[in-house]
Amino acid sequence: MQHLPTARAEPTQPAAGIWKRMRLWGIAHAVDDLYQGLVPAALPYFVLDRGYSYLAASGLTLAATLGSSLPQPIFGLAVDRFRLGWLPAGGIAVAGIGLGLSGLVTGYPAVWTLILLSGLGVAMFHPAAGKAAREAAGESTSGMSIFAAGGSVGFFLAPVLATPALMAWGVGATALFMPPAVLMAFLLLRNRRRHSEMIADAPPRAGADRWGPFAVLTAVEVVRSVMFFGINTFIALYWIGYLNGSKVMAGVALACFLVGGVSGTLLGGRIADRIGSVRTVQLGGAVAIPLLLAFRMTSGTVAPLIFAVLVGVAVNIPFAVLVKLGQDYLPTRPGTAAGVTLGLGVSIGGLSAPVLGAIADHYGTQAVFTALCVVPPLVLLLGLLLPEPRIERATA
C-alpha cells in the first residue's frame, strides 16, 4: 500500500449536489444545537415558575456546559476507535428527551441532572456527526459549511420557537420539543445503511497526525469563540445601555448578528474551496479587524445594525473551515478533531463571558466591545502560524 499526497482538493461539486449529500447532516445539527439554545431561553421561566434564584439558574447553565463540552473529546476518541454509527441518533434523542423532561419534573436536583443529560447528548452527537459529515462532504469545505451552519441555525431558532411556547404554557412547555429529537433520531438511524454504502468505495484518508498544527488551530478556535460569545452575550445590553435603543431593537441587533453568523459560515466554506482553508482562516481574522472597530465607533439606528450583520459574517467565516482543517491535521482521528473544534474549543472560549461581565460592571458595555477589538488580530496572528494541510489517500 502506498500513500499518494495530493496538493489540491477534489473538484468543486455543484451546489445542488453538495446540498443533497449534506442536507440531512445540516438539519440534524440544527436540531441538536436547538437543545443547546433552549437552555438559556428557558432559564427565565425556571426563575419565574419555580422561584429559582439567579445562582440556581446559572447552575443549570453550568450543567449544560459540563455535559456538552468536557466529554466531547472522549466521545471523539471512541468514535475513531469504533464505528458507533448509531451515536448521532442516540445523542439527539438524549439531548431532546433530557431537555424536554426538565420542565416536567419538580425537584432542582432532577432538573439539573436532566439538563446535564441533555448536554451529554449534545456531546455524543458532535464528534460522530462531524466524522460522518466529513465522510459525506469529502474534501468540499462548502459541504462542511452546511453541516456547521446547521448548528448556528438551531441555536438561533431556539429562542424564536421557545419564547412563545414558554410564555403561553410555562416551563412545562419544554416537553413540546421532544418530538423533533425523536423524529431526527429515526431519520439518522434509517440513513445509516445508505451512508455506509456511499462511503464504502471512497479510499480511506491517510497520513500522520500533526498535533502541533492542531494545537495552534485549537487556539484559533478558542480565541474566535471568545469573540463570538462576547458579542452574542453583550450586544443586546450594548444596544440598550450605550446606544440607548429599545429592547425590541436590541433583539433585532442580536438576530442580525446571528443571521450574519450563519451567512459567514456558509460563505467561509465557499471561499475555502477557492483559496484554501488556511488563507480563509487568515481572511476571517483580517476582515473582522476593521468591521469590529467600525461597529464599536458607529452610533445611530441603522448603521450599527449593518455592522452587526457584517461582524457576524466575519467572525464565522473561519468556523466550518476550522472543523475541516482540524480533521485534515488529524486524518486518522476525525472524531477527536470534531470533538475538540466543535465542542471543547468553543466551550473554553465561552468561559470568557464572566471576565467580560466584570469589565461591563466596572466600565460599561462599550468597554466590552473595546476589549473585543483586540481579539481579531490574535485570530490573524495565530492563523499565520497554521501550515497548509497535507491531504493523502491510501491506495492499494
Image (spheres, rainbow, N blue to C red):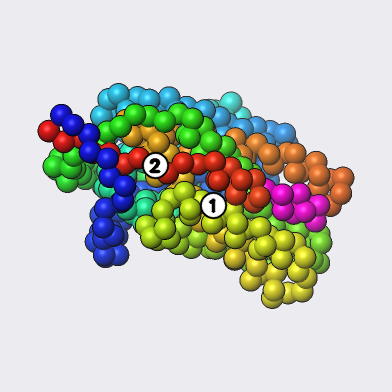
Q: Of residues 74 and 45, which is closer to you in this image?
A: 74
Residue at image point 56% right, 34% down: 65
Q: How crowded is mark 1: few (under 14 residues within 10 Å), some or many (20 or more)?
A: many
Please, what is the dominant secondary structure of the magenta stretch? Answer: helix
Query: Which is nearer the N-term, disc 1 or disc 2?
Result: 1
Residue ranking furthest to the right: 362
Q: Mark 2 points at which residue?
A: 389
Residue 326 drawn at (x, y percent)? 43, 39
Residue 92 in the figure: left or right of residue 50: left
Q: Is residue 362 magenta?
A: no
Residue at image point 15% right, 40% down: 200
> Which quadrant does the C terminus fall into?
top left
Residue at image point 26% right, 53% down: 10
Report which quarter residue 13 is drawn in: bottom left
Amino acid residing under circle 1: Gln
Q: Does the magenta stretch include residue 372?
A: yes
Residue 252 in the figure: left or right of residue 179: right
**Residue 269 in sight from this viewpoint:** no
Q: Of residues 74 and 35, which is closer to you in this image?
A: 74
Q: Of residues 176 and 72, which is closer to you in this image?
A: 72
In terms of secondary structure, where does tag 2 sit?
loop
